Amino acid sequence: MNREEYFEFIKNSNNLRLEVNSDPYRLHFHLMPPMGWLNDPNGLCVIKGVNHIYFQYTPFSATWGMKLWGHYSTENWIDYKEHDAFLFPDIKEDKDGVYSGSAFVENDEVHYFYTGNVKYTDKKYDYILNGREQNVIELISKDGFNYKNKIVLLKNSDYPKNMSTHVRDPKVFKIENDYFMILGARSKDNKGCAILYKSTDLKRWIYYMEIKSDKYYGYMWECCDLVKVEDVWFLICCPQGIEQDGINFANIYQIGYFPININFKEKTYNLGEFIELDRGFDIYAPQTFIDNKGRTVLIAWMGIPDANYTNNKTIKNGWQHALSIPRILSKKGNKILQQPLPELESLRSNKKVSTDNHIKFLVSTFELIIDIEDSNKFLLIMEDIKLSFKNNIFSLEMNESGEGRDKRAVYLEELKNIQMFVDTSSIEIFINDGEEVFTSRFYPKNKNINVEVFNKGTCTYYDLNNFKIVKE
Ligand code: FRU
């Protein structure tokens, strides 16, 4: 779908939009595809004081299809503008989708880097060692809306000889006077890894180094991101192919990070153990950036590919998936902490505080803050969903409303507090000040959700209002 076809489609899409907007499972304080499908957040950046959020977008289908980049922007994280799609597959090097990528802003220019996906169909291919091009393409914009031409920077032949044809999702950052680009990859011997390129002008990129783990962490790492939180570097990535190990690595694909002690000059590094970033059912493909207030913010796709649970309830109404609540990153030792953006506090109304051991309420979009004095006494029931803590295991258990989602869990030394956001059909649970997070979708039968909390401690409840999203 090129630009012209997109605008033709949009002109005739009023009915689809109305149908999507009438879905009771539409979210109120999350970014969703205006219609159709959304996956990874892309190109997060600040242009003239405004945060820009692009995303993998297939407006004409609620299931996987040709990828464009959709576009939102916001100054305050509460009032948003919905823009026309930004990027389209319209050259031979990206003809099967403008895949994920990032933005790097310097001297009033935004440099976007993304993967142009090309899939050959003329004969039989395995699509691992052959049959696919993954081109790194750059474009430059002054305003985040317009650009002139696409520049192909790297092709399959520019990747190291030991790489398969899966090399994608460029993320660019600067250290002193050098620019680095990290890409996620699958080596020919089926190991996930990251590769780095270096440039002094953002145009000519020279292969620099590979980052891989001694221990096997899957066959492919998608959406790699090297981010410094305070004084520690972390390699955030999404490994595919890690086997479930008890309560760990329970999703089909993982979202997590390695603390990494890296010396860019010497090309040396030391990877720590891989740590899961989120334990929920619906979370993948995160991207970080420094927002317009200077904070390191992470946004992820509130969805996951190839899972055996569904979102049929929204697909039926012409859309699927959303972006997570933006989270501010900080660290504790070698662990990343995630805190929901404080701006969300301005959505609060109707505060209620309770110290009763047992409270019940009926709500649809809300925030709950639970301080826990005796973790043995904690239990939360939300329709047919249960949150519990037993023998140091915190669990989220779903039944019918999980549409195939069953149980996810994490080991905790202790359970001190929970901050939980429920938005019609999504739930984000921040535990112990963001040490652990669970992000999931669920589909309650009734608009108002029955919540029951058993707890010794204080429980603070708020209704949450909607984001204001204006179509430009
Ligand atoms: C992750 C991902 C990326 C790719 C994009 C395509 O969800 O598979 O690796 O660039 O989605 O939409």
Image (cartoon, rainbow, N blue to C red):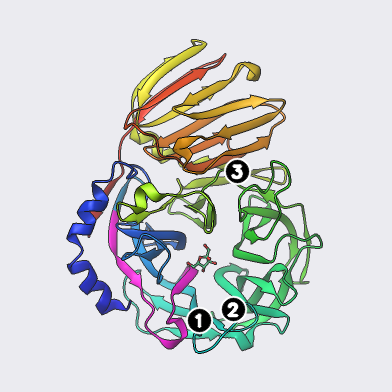
- From the viewer's perspective, is residue 417 above or below residue 411? above
Asked if residue 72 is positioned above or below residue 174 in the image, the reply reads: above
Q: Which residue is mark 1?
A: 119
Proximity of marks 1 and 2: CB atoms separated by less than 8 Å = yes
Q: Name the residue rendered at 49%, 12% in the picture.
A: 358
Q: Quote the CA–CA distance across marks 1 and 2.
A: 8 Å
Q: Residue at x 40, y 59 (%)?
A: 38
Amino acid bearing label 2:
Tyr
Is residue 76 in sight in this rendering? no
| Closer mark to the observer between disc 3 and disc 1 | 1
Residue type pointed to by label 1: Lys
Q: Position of residue 122 (x, y in %)?
A: 50, 89
- Looking at marks 3 and 1 on the same chain, the residue that comes earlier in the sequence is marked by 1
In the rendering, at what x and y percent does residue 145 appear?
32, 70
Q: Residues within 10 Å of mark 2 (few under 14, many from 20)?
A: some
Q: CA distance from mark 3 to mark 1?
A: 33 Å
> Tag 3, which secondary structure?
loop
Quadrant placement of the N terminus: bottom left
N-terminal label among 1 and 2: 1
Mainly helix, strand or loop, the magenta region? strand
State which quadrant residue 57 falls in: bottom left
Specify start and end residues of the magenta stretch as a single range.
Answer: 81-105
Q: Which mark is residue 127?
A: 2
Q: Label 3 sits on what residue type?
A: Arg
Q: Which mark is residue 279?
A: 3
| Residue located 77% across and 54% down the image | 272
